[in-house]
Amino acid sequence: MTTSINPLLLDFPDHFETDRLLIRAPRPGDGAVVTPAIHESHAELHPWMPWAVKPQSDVETEAVMRRMAAAFIRREELMLLLFRKADGVFVGSSGLHHIDWTVPCFEIGYWVRTPLSGQGYVTEAVHGITGFAFDTLQAERVEIRCDASNERSAAVARRAGYTQEACLRHNARSNTGSLRDTLVFAKLRPTT
């Protein structure tokens, strides 16, 4: 028997912390800090992120932040921004996407600004967001999907303790139009 969840009636915080990060929902005005990070990281984002075909303008990024803030309130997408607690520097973005509240099941996506890559911020964020999904949102399943050629993204999933369940062959097009394979990693709710 399944219980019907009305996600609009779920009360949960729009922010939480890990050791080094403040992780929070987007707000109006965030485009001003996100746009420069996208621009400086565009070469690294372009091969993997469908939204990074071309650099975004300040106006486009601000519109995305406002749409995602509204989607968070509607519980349709839970975009999360990562800020370094020590100095407030914007680190990158993550969140819980492709939500199925009937399970509940979520997919974590992530990117880090290029100058801060390789410092463990994304793995730390994934651990924190996974805990948030299981403990606060009562997730039964959390997934990470990435292009099979994106070794750094797959390494994050493995470091965070996710199990590779599948390789979906030729299931999507890359930004260059070529067919790509997608790795599917997952974690299930811990049993007591």
Image: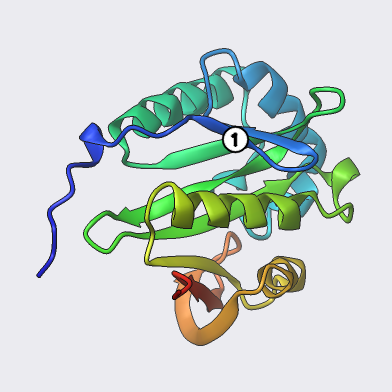
* Residue at 39 percent of width and 42 percent of height: 77
Query: At 89% from the left edge and 52% from the top edge, which residue is drawn?
Result: 119
Q: Seen in the image, is 50 located left or right of residue 192?
A: right
Q: Residue at x 83, y 55 (%)?
A: 120
Residue 128 visible in the snapshot: yes
Q: Position of residue 58 (x, y in %)?
A: 63, 19
**Residue 137 against residue 166 in the figure, above or below:** above
Q: Is residue 38 left or right of residue 58?
A: right
Residue under the point 55% across and 54% down: 131
Q: Is residue 152 above or below residue 67?
A: below
From the viewer's perspective, is 34 left or right of 69? right
Residue 104 vertical placement versus 13 (above, below):
below
How would you rate the neighbour count of disc 1 (Cα within 10 Å): few for under 14, some for 14-19, many for 20 or more?
few
Quarter of the image that includes the N terminus? bottom left
Question: In terms of depth relative to the viewer, which is nearer, 67 or 43?
Answer: 67
* Residue located beneath label 1 in the image: 16
Q: Residue furthest front?
A: 192
Q: Nearer the viewer, residue 187 or 1?
A: 1
Q: Position of residue 89 (x, y in %)?
A: 81, 26
Kindly state the secondary structure of the residue where label 1 is placed: strand
Which image quarter: residue 192?
Answer: bottom left
- Residue 137 image position (x, y, % from top left): 39, 49
* Amino acid type assigned to the residue bearing label 1 in the image: Phe
